[in-house]
Amino acid sequence: MKSTLLAGGVAILVVQLCIAVMGQEPAKKATEGVALKTGERTLPLSLANPEEAGMSTERLALLGKTINVEIARGQLPGGVLLIARRNKIVYYEAFGYRDKSAGVPMTKDTLFSVASMTKPMTAVAALQLYEQGKLVMNDPLAKYFPQFAKMQVAVMDAKQENIIDKVPAARPITVQDLFRHTSGIPYGGRGTTAVHKMLPAGSEASSSTLSGSEFIEKLSSAPLLYQPGTVWDYGFGLDLLGLIVEKITEQSFAQYMQQNVWKPLGMVDTSFSVSPDKVTRYAKPLPNDPITGQPQPSSIPVARKFDCGGGCAISTASDYLRFALMLMKKGQLGDTRILSRKTVEYMLSNQLGPDVKNLIVNADPTRANYGFGLGLAVRTTAGVVPVMGSVRDFGWSGAFGTHWWADPREELVVVWMAATPGTIRWTYREMINALVYQAIVN
């Protein structure tokens, strides 16, 4: 078996020798994979020539050329890109700098704040409890947190600057609303209405300043922006789901995730904090936004007051590939099953009916006209959307620049890790999408 590491075509002799001795493919257990050289992470799939998986080495080389041009232009500090197709890894490269200011080069084991890429992982954790009958989609949020029992919806003036009245919610906020962003509780930092100003800016800001109980009190004391179930608007649903998981399991969300999702999948570098021995591996953005020129936050995330399921995880490209592959493979990676096939099919189905107003474009312009499943976006049409793909592809992104998607029809999974917290991150999502798909030749 010939295995090569792209781009550059460097032979992975360790893999070849190992296979020659063992006479078989690398172990299929989720916690095992391909042994790589020092500084790289163990992978869940074998490395292969792109042509073995229907992709072009020559065309894939355009990825490296394009990314390196962006780094040279000062638009991008660096990144890590992992591409798997037809059960083989065809591209795995690190570019540029982990910390450009300090001159530290990017490595494949670099840690990134994945922000809202935490949300699909939180959804999987909650769906495990759903499978056990401990959580029901129509459960009211108030079942777990009574403060939400009598929510009201704000009535605002024409400019939405003042709340002039409040009306009772037509129905309770449900668990399903939390999964699909139809709770009526948006991120405070994503709007300027009177309701937005009463809410925390986002998941990161909440978890660093509020305890879980303080967070619940803060959200429940503000009126809803919309009637529950009527509008998709990006918000705190997955953070609330994480706290529900804590309530049901009587353990911290971090403990639950470690025991039931991350460790079983072999995600050895994924957590809600950066341990002291891994601090030097954390990726930092450029000091100033390349578009606005404004300073960008570059410090390692502070200690959390609660484990926020909406946006607080730290991970690596290889770790997140394991999670994405598990969903692609209908809930199983190697011998490890995380969810049932039917549960994953349900998760990856569009949950927004015709009566739900879809504002997903406001959260991520590259996902315009996508539908939404449970914790992630799902594609419902071949055209219209601004990126290539197939109907039923799925994924989600992070506000700090990370991105991933899976395309079952093409047997394709792509993970892009970068520290680009400004709006330029949207450009790289579209750019990498086009460069990956143009490399498919059969």
Image (spheres, helix red, strand yellow):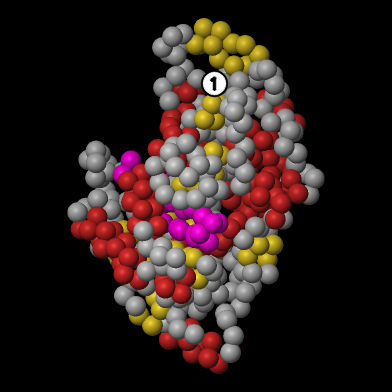
Q: Residue tagged by mark 1?
A: 225
Quadrant of the drawing holding the C terminus:
bottom left
Of all residues, the one furthest to the right in this rendering is: 133
In which image quadrant can residue 268 be found?
A: bottom right
Residue shown at 75%/41% (left/top)? 135
Is 422 a magenta residue? yes
Let me know if residue 86 appears in the view.
yes
234 or 257: which is nearer to us?
234
Name the spot of residue 83 as percent of width and height, x first.
44, 63
Q: Is residue 234 left or right of residue 421?
A: right
- Determine the secondary structure under disc 1: loop
Q: Where residue 222 sits: x, y (%)?
A: 57, 21
Position in image of residue 109 (x %, y %): 43, 66
Whether residue 401 sits left or right of residue 328 in the image: it is left
Question: Where are the magenta residues, as a range?
Answer: 399-424
- Crowdedness of circle 1 by 10 Å Cα count: few (<14), some, many (20+)? many
Q: Nearer the viewer, residue 349 or 121?
A: 349
User: Is 211 drawn above or below residue 83 in the view shown?
Assistant: above
Q: Quadrant of residue 49?
A: bottom left
